[in-house]
Image: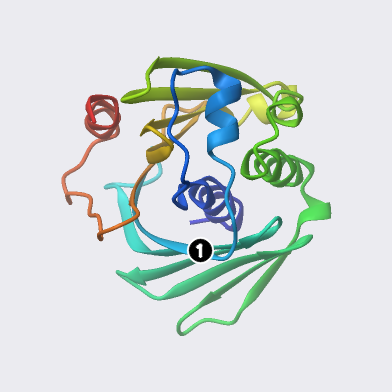
């Protein structure tokens, strides 16, 4: 998985740290406000990535850590060990048995925009988020759906949408859909480990997310 894709999933996953408030309605501003997180916090995750370049989905699991704005870690423990960290304007990847790699955000305007946008989401700042994405909410308080569509034309060349499913003030599923028919789905749980079946499909996981 590329540094850009890993960092993107890390940013999405940082939103799953439990929050105390419960939504009364699926209003987009209320949803975004409820997703505000207090650092530090960690949560278990399982993620499947689908691509025409892969013969089968790449499935990983581990732990996500949110240390504050622009301070994230994605610690993969299965089927290999790897830590991806975002510290300010730098992304680093440290995989067991390989040389550490560093990725400068300033060299990738698209990814830098993602960092800025999700920083706004973690801060519960709907106005700032809407400067980067078209935001749409649907469902109800018991089962809601939040869809983010990038406004920037360059971002739309790669990213079709980010779709978040949840209940109350707790997201449970994140889907990042690219423009090539692929993407990734991340399942999370604040209280217990989660898993993805080895024969999972993108459509199947998206249906599962919508049914939860």
Q: How many marks?
A: 1
| Residue at image coords 20%, 42% | 200
| Residue at image coords 75%, 46% | 112
| Residue at image coords 43%, 37% | 169
In the rendered image, the residue lying farthest to the right is: 106
Classed neighbour count for the residue bearing mark 1: other residues with Cα under 10 Å, few (<14), some (14–19), many (≥20): some
In the rendered image, the residue lying farthest to the bottom is: 97
Q: x, y percentage for residue 210?
A: 28, 25
| Residue at image coords 70%, 34% | 125
Q: Say if 126 sits above or below 104 in the image.
A: above
Q: Tell me how the rendering is colored.
A: rainbow
- Front one among 83 and 72: 72
- Front one among 198 and 175: 175
- Front one among 24 and 137: 24
Q: Say if 105 sits above or below 30 in the image.
A: below
- Front one among 27 and 112: 27
Q: x, y percentage for residue 25?
A: 44, 18
Q: Say if 46 sits above or below 24 in the image.
A: below
The image quarter containing residue 194 is bottom left
* Residue 137 visible in the snapshot: yes
Q: Say if 126 sits above or below 191 in the image.
A: above
Q: x, y percentage for residue 148?
A: 57, 25
Q: x, y percentage for residue 121?
A: 64, 38
* Residue 184 visible in the snapshot: no
Residue position for label 1 = 41
Q: Secondary structure at mark 1?
A: strand
Q: Quadrant of the C terminus?
A: top left
């Amino acid at each position: 998985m590329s540094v850009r894709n890993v960092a993107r999933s890390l940013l999405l996953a940082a939103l799953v740290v439990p929050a105390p408030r419960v939504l009364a309605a699926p209003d987009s501003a209320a949803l975004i406000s409820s997703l505000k997180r207090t650092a530090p916090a960690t949560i278990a995750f399982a993620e499947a990535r689908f691509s025409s370049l892969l013969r089968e989905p790449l499935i990983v699991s581990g732990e996500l850590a949110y240390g504050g704005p622009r301070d994230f870690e994605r610690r993969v423990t299965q089927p290999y060990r790897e830590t991806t960290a975002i510290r300010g304007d730098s992304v680093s990847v440290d995989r067991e048995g390989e040389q550490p790699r560093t990725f400068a955000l300033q060299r990738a305007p698209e990814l830098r925009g993602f960092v800025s946008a999700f920083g706004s989401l973690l801060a519960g700042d709907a106005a700032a988020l809407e400067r980067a994405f078209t935001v749409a909410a649907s469902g109800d308080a018991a089962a809601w759906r939040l869809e983010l569509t990038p406004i920037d034309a360059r971002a739309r060349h790669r990213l079709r949408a980010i779709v978040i499913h949840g209940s109350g003030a707790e997201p449970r599923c994140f889907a990042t859909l690219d423009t090539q028919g692929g993407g990734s789905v991340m399942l999370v749980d604040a209280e217990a480990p989660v898993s993805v079946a080895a024969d999972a499909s993108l459509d199947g996981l998206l249906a599962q997310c919508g049914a939860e």
